[in-house]
Amino acid sequence: MPAALPLRSDFDSQTLRGLARRCEDSNQSRRLLSLAAVYDGMSRTEAARLGGMDRQTLRHWVLRFNKDGPEGLFDRWSPGPARRLSDDQLRELATIVETGPDVQTDGVVRWRRVDLQAVIKERFGVEYGERWVSQILHDLGFSHMSARPQHPKQNTRVIEAFKKTSPTHLPPT
């Protein structure tokens, strides 16, 4: 079995425990306490168990600690894949959503995700699934609201005449 990786010499267990106490990230604090246990002479297996990890994971954190110090013990999340629509295209899509569909050209009275999916593919040449269309709309600041659809030939005068006209103040009974 190969020898254990040595830890940095510019830290000790008391320093790491003090950092763990002041730390706001619970994962970093847990890793700092495991490394402090290693500085105290605890076996790597026991120190890993103390931090809720296995020995190999502790070894990875030792490598990052030796390279970057306590800052290397933060979780590093990947930003994910780059957007396939440019900022200009996203602004154009936001304008399309805000203005709403045209019944004659778009064939719909309100936007659904599947409709916007087709618009994105047609105008920008980019294919997205419905779920990602929803995420794009959320990132653009739109929320899911389903307005009641209106028939394009609806007569507003007929609607107003049909509404109930109750008096504003009812007399006491």
Image (spheres, helix red, strand yellow):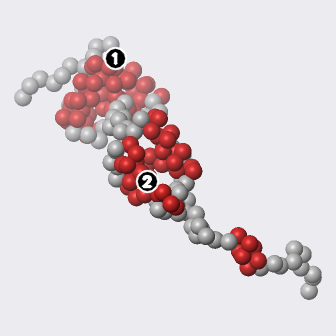
Residue placed at 52% from the left, 56% from the top? 101
> Residue 97, position in %: x, y?
52, 50
Residue placed at 35% from the left, 35% from the top? 82
Query: Which quarter of the figure is the N terminus placed in?
Result: top left
In the displayed image of the protein, which residue is found farthest to the top? Answer: 10
> Residue 130, position in %: x, y?
38, 55
Crowdedness near tag 2: few (<14), some (14–19) or many (≥20) residues, C-alpha within 10 Å: many
Crowdedness near tag 1: few (<14), some (14–19) or many (≥20) residues, C-alpha within 10 Å: few
Query: Which quarter of the figure is the C terminus placed in?
Result: bottom right
Per the image, label 2 sits on a secondary structure element best described as helix
Sequence-first disc among 1 and 2:
1
| Residue 99 in view, yes or no | yes
Pick the residue in front: 24 or 119.
119
Task: Examine the image and state in which quarter residue 21 appears.
Answer: top left
Task: Examine the image and state in which quarter residue 61 appears.
Answer: top left
Per the image, label 1 sits on a secondary structure element best described as loop
Mark 2 highlights which residue? 116
The amino acid type of the residue labelled 1 equals Phe
